[in-house]
Amino acid sequence: MNARSVTAAAAIIVSIASGVFAPARAADRIPTYVKTAIANPARAEKDPEVDQRRHPAELMAFADVKPGDKVLDLIPGSGYFSKIFSGIVGSKGHVYSIWPTEYDNVSHPDSDNLRALAKTPAFANVTVIVQPANALTAPEPLDVVFTSQNYHDYPDKFMGPTDPMILNRAVFNALKPGGVFIVIDHAAQPGAGVRDTESLHRIDPETVKAQVTAAGFKFEAASEVLRNPADPHTVKVFDPSIRRHTDQFVFRFRKPRAKQG
């Protein structure tokens, strides 16, 4: 080995020892403002117990939510994610927690509780809106539209049903150029399409990808943080054997940025 080779080998050893080639830990990739929002004591006491399985820090980083953003949390349930978004976007941003009327009709008192929460100083940047499933709109252009475990509901009877393409086009129109649409849902068997949306509350990930991109979005990335290969994909998501541990896909779609003139 010549002198140059010895020097190169030594440099590699030093680099490895100093961590240059070591992959960054997931925690190191979480922005400080995300960590602060999750640590907010104004969140419900039970939320931190749920964080371990719902991975909100990784999801917020994946969604690229930033201070000052305008976010739409679609079908927000208990407000778990709305509260985190509120802490991230801060006083210069806003969170619109939107309930389709059809869903709100069968889910009270969730929207009522969220409205009460939005009246508190800690969550003053949250607005709760109820509107028809087939007429999604936002008060202002959005940076992020986020929906967790509810995309599969749109083709079901209680939602109208509503053609998912109506939803996807409405989301596209509501977003700013370059804005993102995050879809999280329970995975069905490959090739199942929308067969299991009503019975098992699941949807084929590839069907979602095809539907959303058909509305003009670009599929950008998927996160594996909620995947569970042990899920058989053949049981209802509320089955005790899999409840709260279903195999979930996390997709990020982006509205194309405006072309430079």
Image (cartoon, grey):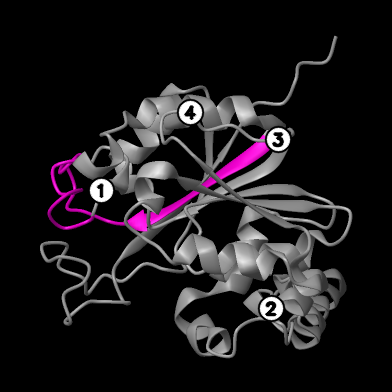
SS for dot 3: loop
Q: Which residue lies at the image location 59% right of the left edge and 90% below the top edge? A: 45
Dot 1 or dot 4, earlier in sequence: 4
What is the x, y in percent for residue 202?
A: 23, 54
Q: Are there few (<14), some (14-19), or many (20+) residues within 10 Å of tag 2?
A: many
Q: Which residue lies at the image location 46% right of the left edge and 30% below the top edge? A: 168
Over which residues does the magenta segment extend?
A: 179-201
Residue type beneath disc 4 = Ala
Q: Which residue is mark 2?
A: 38
Marks 2/4: CA–CA distance: 32 Å
Q: Which residue is mark 3?
A: 139
Q: Which residue is mark 1?
A: 203
Marks 3/2: CA–CA distance: 26 Å
Marks 1/3: CA–CA distance: 30 Å
Q: Which residue is mark 4?
A: 135
Marks 3/4: CA–CA distance: 13 Å
